[in-house]
Image (spheres, rainbow, N blue to C red):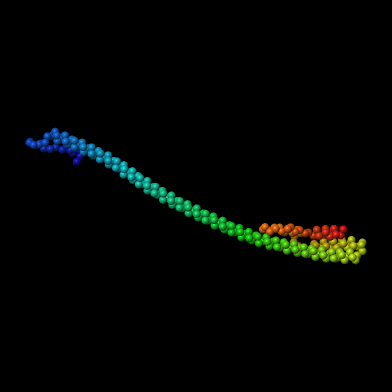
Amino acid sequence: MTPQDIREKTFEKAMFGGYDMGGVDDFMEEAAAELESAQRENATLRAKMKVLVDKIEEYRASEDAMRMTLMSAQKLSSQIEAEARAKADKLVAEAQATASRSLEALKAETVKEQAKLREAKEAFNRFFEDAKSVCVRQLESLERISKSAAPAKQEEAVDATVKSIEDSVARIPDEPAPKIDISPVMGETAPRETITPEEITRLFNMGGN
């Protein structure tokens, strides 16, 4: 029933004992007005309810979006953490492998240098012994000459002997270098030892003069 239905409602007139038509009309007008007011209020409430429902749906959609965003952020964080951990593990493994290779190379180089040092010492010892033997033989020869030869011939004999020493030194095997440097290897301290054929000759020349 609408307010218009109330306003248009008609009643049959009674001859006796009927209602006052004016009072009935007034009541019906008042009832129609109240119904209109109730309908307007109901419409307002419905509009407000629709707004609230829309807001709730909006909040629900926002909540779902926030939930999805949070889940995506958590997933991305876990992925970044896993990638960072994997990268760190890889770097550590590479560093350990590099350090291991460097250590092995250093050990091999140490062994190699120690072998070179031993060879240099052995070569120097052989050179020294050969030179010593030559000197001893030539000194013995000089001593014999000085005892048996005349003074005029002694100088010629000495010169010949010195020349013989030079030739003998020149024939010494080429195992050591002319100058042998025994240098420190991996923290080992060793003195420098040097001997040359020219120095041996010079010493004998000084002795002859």
Side of 182 relative to 37 (left or right): right
**Residue 170: quarter of image:** bottom right
User: Residue 37 location, x and y as percent?
Assistant: 23, 37
Which image quarter holds the C terminus?
bottom right
Task: Using the rendered image of the protein, determine whether residue 11 is visible from the camera's viewpoint.
Answer: yes
Residue 171 in view here: no
Left or right of 207 on screen, residue 32: left
Identity of the residue drawn at 92% across and 62% down: 151
Q: Nearer the viewer, residue 50 or 5?
A: 50
All told, the count of numbered labels is 0
Q: Quadrant of residue 125?
A: bottom right
Q: Looking at the rendering, in which quadrant would you find the N terminus?
A: top left
Question: Residue sitting at 41 percent across and 48 percent down?
Answer: 69
What is the residue that sits farthest to the top in this orientation?
Answer: 22
Relative to 34, say whether 125 is above or below. Answer: below
User: Toward which corner of the image does residue 58 lie, by quadrant?
Assistant: top left
Q: Position of residue 55 (x, y in %)?
A: 33, 43
Nearest the eye: 187 or 66: 187
Q: Is residue 147 left or right of residue 39?
A: right
Q: Position of residue 202 (x, y in %)?
A: 83, 58
